[in-house]
Amino acid sequence: MAQLWGGRFTKDTDQRVYEFNASIGFDRRLFHQDIEGSMAHVSMLTRQGILTEDEGKRIAEGLQGIRRDVEAGRLEISEKYEDIHSFVEAVLTERIGDAGKKLHTGRSRNDQVALDMRLYTRYRVTETARLLEELLDTILGTMAENTETYMPGFTHLQKAQPTTLAHHYGAYFEMFRRDRLRMTDIYERMNYCPLGAGALAGTTYPLDREYVAAALKFAGPTMNSMDSVSDRDYLIEYLAALATVMMHLSRFCEEIILWNSNEYRFVEIDDAYSTGSSIMPQKKNPDIAELIRGKTGRVYGALMSLLTTMKGLPLAYNKDMQEDKEMAFDAMDTVADCLSLFAGMLRTMKFNKERMAESAMSGFTNATDAADYLVGKGVPFRDAHGIVGRLVLYCIEKNTSIDKLSLEELRKISDKFEEDIFDAVSLKTCVERRLTAGGPGPAVMNKTIRMYRDWLDQVKRESF
């Protein structure tokens, strides 16, 4: 078929070259954005007197008809066209005649695709923000119910100090809260309209770029036409944020996989989010958590792909930039699926609270509190550290724990121990006494949870 740019050429493009060059197989998902951008462009052209009122009306009605027919399944986006822009313009011209050829007045495919991609990415940024809010809601609900659910805290995957499930989940709330804040930052930075930049140097037509920007709900037009058509920073920034989201999901999944194991038995994943084995009937595998962990790599790959594509490109537009779409679309879809499924898995997961508390007591997580107890009795911390180290060694040799020793045994190691040591090293005391900001003490955690709730409610009210 004839190309939009065919006048300069004396023979048809080689079919393999055409197929290699075409993008409609993946940019067809920009259809709604292409129609939306064209509607705003036509409205502006009519307002500026570049098109007559009749031409503007016919083009607008034609575009609306194409949108209705595609949405209703009466019109198929055919791959005989090079890209989504060619499809829309060709069908429009078929339907309304030569007036359809005026749709492209005052714009280039360079600024057109820049607009479509920016509109589409803006939509996906808002989608990611909503999904993060749903996940944060889920995490916060679990926190509110588990401020006194004791569990071991770990460093180096070894038991370190006692904490609570609310405190542990709070660490992930902070991670995903930062992710949500990044969506706001990205939205605000990217929310400028490139349409009107033309191929790279604007146009001689008296376009009203501010009008188009306002019609499409942008903060304003972009300020340099060369940068407008060659900028993909906003997409790189978004992919970097998605990669960070996936990193956080992957870390959480790794812990859930461990907690779900027979060795930990902290949680049971709901049947709806588990699978079995084809040969071992006893198995209940955490496949969703494992798949999310695995899919992190493909999102990282999309980011690295676009960074590599952009790193050597001179100004302004280059065909290399067509490669910004396929992997980016895949990354956006992947993160949306992962966030939705992960939130569902968390909501249905059950906790073995007795097992978690038992585990917290069995790994000397209260050793630091025993040392702090001695400091309270006047022992220098470094000496207290050594005393409790010997105490732990004694417990290991006796296959017991600090709280199960008799006072007589404790006093053989230090005469500073009194009857109140047993209360000092109880899980309840160990946790409740940690009252510094950000700590796990229930009083602190309840205050933090209220702050989180207020923040999340405010974020939900403040739409992009």
Image (cartoon, rainbow, N blue to C red):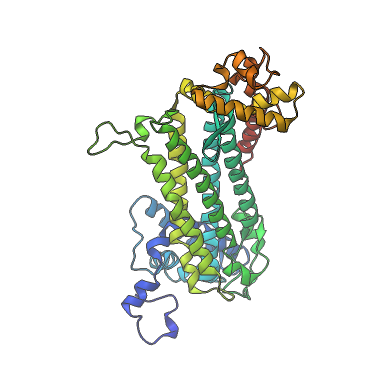
One can see residue 170 in this view: yes
Give the quarter of the figure containing the N terminus: bottom left
**Most foreground residue, 149 or 395:** 395
Residue furthest toward the left? 279
Q: Would residue 450 be visible to someone looking at this image? A: no
- Residue furthest to the front: 412
Could you say which is closer to the camera, residue 294 or residue 156? 156
Q: Residue at x 59, y 17 (%)?
A: 409
Q: Position of residue 449 (x, y in %)?
A: 63, 28
Give percent across and percent down for residue 210: 66, 61
Nearer to the camera, 391 or 258: 391
Q: Residue furthest top?
A: 419
The image quadrant that residue 406 belongs to is top right
Is 411 situated above or below 65?
above
Q: Residue furthest right?
A: 378
Query: Is residue 65 shown above or below 1?
Result: above
Compared to residue 261, the image places residue 290 above or below, namely below
What count of labels does the image hold? 0
Q: Nearer the viewer, residue 326 or 148?
A: 148
Residue shown at 61% from the left, 28% from the top: 390
Q: Position of residue 275 (x, y in %)?
A: 31, 36
User: In the drawing, does residue 400 fall left or right of residue 2?
Assistant: right
Q: Is residue 461 above or below residue 440?
A: below
The image quadrant where one finds the C terminus is top right
Relative image position of residue 55 (x, y in whole percent): 51, 65
Based on the displayed image, in which of its 4 quarters is residue 77 positioned? bottom left
